[in-house]
Amino acid sequence: MCSGRIDLAFILRAFSNGMDGVFIGACRLNECNYITHGNYHALSTVLLCRKILEYAGVNPERLRIEFMSAGEGILFAEVINDFGRKVKDLGPLGSSEGIDEDALKSKIQEVAKLVPYIKMAKREKLEARLENKAEYDGFFTSDEIDKLFNEVVSYYIDPEKCQACMICQRKCPVEAITGGKNRIHVIDQEKCIKCGTCYEACPPRFGAVTQISGEPAPPPVPEEERTLVRKSA
Ligand code: SF4
Ligand code: SF4
């Protein structure tokens, strides 16, 4: 219905499913039927995604957005033919990048897991409304994307400190924490969207949730070692 509906996750999913190129056709800028101007949002998403693809090692030329009206059939044909030629020249995903296709796909899948975090971290920028397309060019910089990924945090529950109060488990918005009564709680890093709620929620007297950046979270405590042994017992 609206190009503003295009989510970062959709684009990354297409590439991780092996698409060699992704084209987004949007209405002409400043001709949106809605006050939301979704096509500007789509433009920001594409610019951000191109930087992310570059970071992951994918040629950003594989993603394109163009603006046109439903009546501009000739323009549509020209743009699609041009994009088709471009993608053909680049070859299958991974060939112009010099990376094995499967390795590239799994890299994209890893990045895709961070989409909720990226959207949170870049929320203000994604919602910013600039005056014209020229102002959008260079809106997201490579340095900014490098910084974004270098600063990605993970949350980890220190098994030595967790008191199994279950507060974090109840508050996690995506049910990424497993635990229970007298069970040391564990974060499923695959499900975690890095919202930081558990970090805020864990009572300071326990301080069991830690923030880790620049390195992966330690592996989870094995199931059979999760029964809480209280010091007083
Ligand atoms: S950071 Fe957010 S999503 Fe991740 S485990 Fe904590 S509360 Fe759940
Ligand atoms: S809130 Fe803290 S102490 Fe309570 S279960 Fe979660 S990590 Fe453990």
Image (spheres, grey):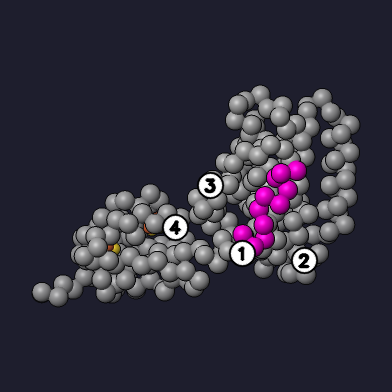
Q: Position of residue 206 (x, y in %)?
A: 23, 66
Check disc 2: other Cα within 10 Å, few if <14, some if 14-19, many if 20+: some
Q: According to the image, label 4 marks what residue?
A: 194
Ligand 2 resides in the quarter of the picture at: bottom left
Report helix, strand or loop for mark 4: loop
Mark seen at residue 123: 3
Q: State yes or no: discs 1 and 4 in contact (Cβ < 8 Å).
A: no
Residue at point 70% right, 61% down? 54
Residue at image mark 2? 97
- Determine which residue is flagged by label 1: 146
Q: Which residues are magenta?
A: 134-145
* Kind of residue sitting beneath label 4: Lys
Name the residue type under label 1. Asp
Q: Earlier in the sequence, mark 2 or mark 3?
A: 2
- Location of residue 110 (image quadrant): bottom right
Q: Secondary structure at mark 3?
A: helix
Amino acid at circle 2? Glu
Ranked by sequence position, the earlier of labels 1 and 4 is: 1
Tell me the residue at 68%/27% (across/down): 32
Image quarter for residue 20? Answer: bottom right
The x and y percentages for residue 57 are 70, 65
**Mark 4 vs mark 2: which is more N-terminal?**
2
Distance between the Cα atoms at labels 2 and 1? 19 Å
Sooner in the amino-acid sequence: mark 3 or mark 1: 3
Residue 10 visible somewhere in the drawing:
no
Who's the residue at 32% across and 57% down the image?
Answer: 200
| Label 4 within 8 A of ligand 1 by Cβ | yes
Amino acid of disc 3: Arg
| Distance in Å between CA atoms under marks 4 and 2 | 30 Å
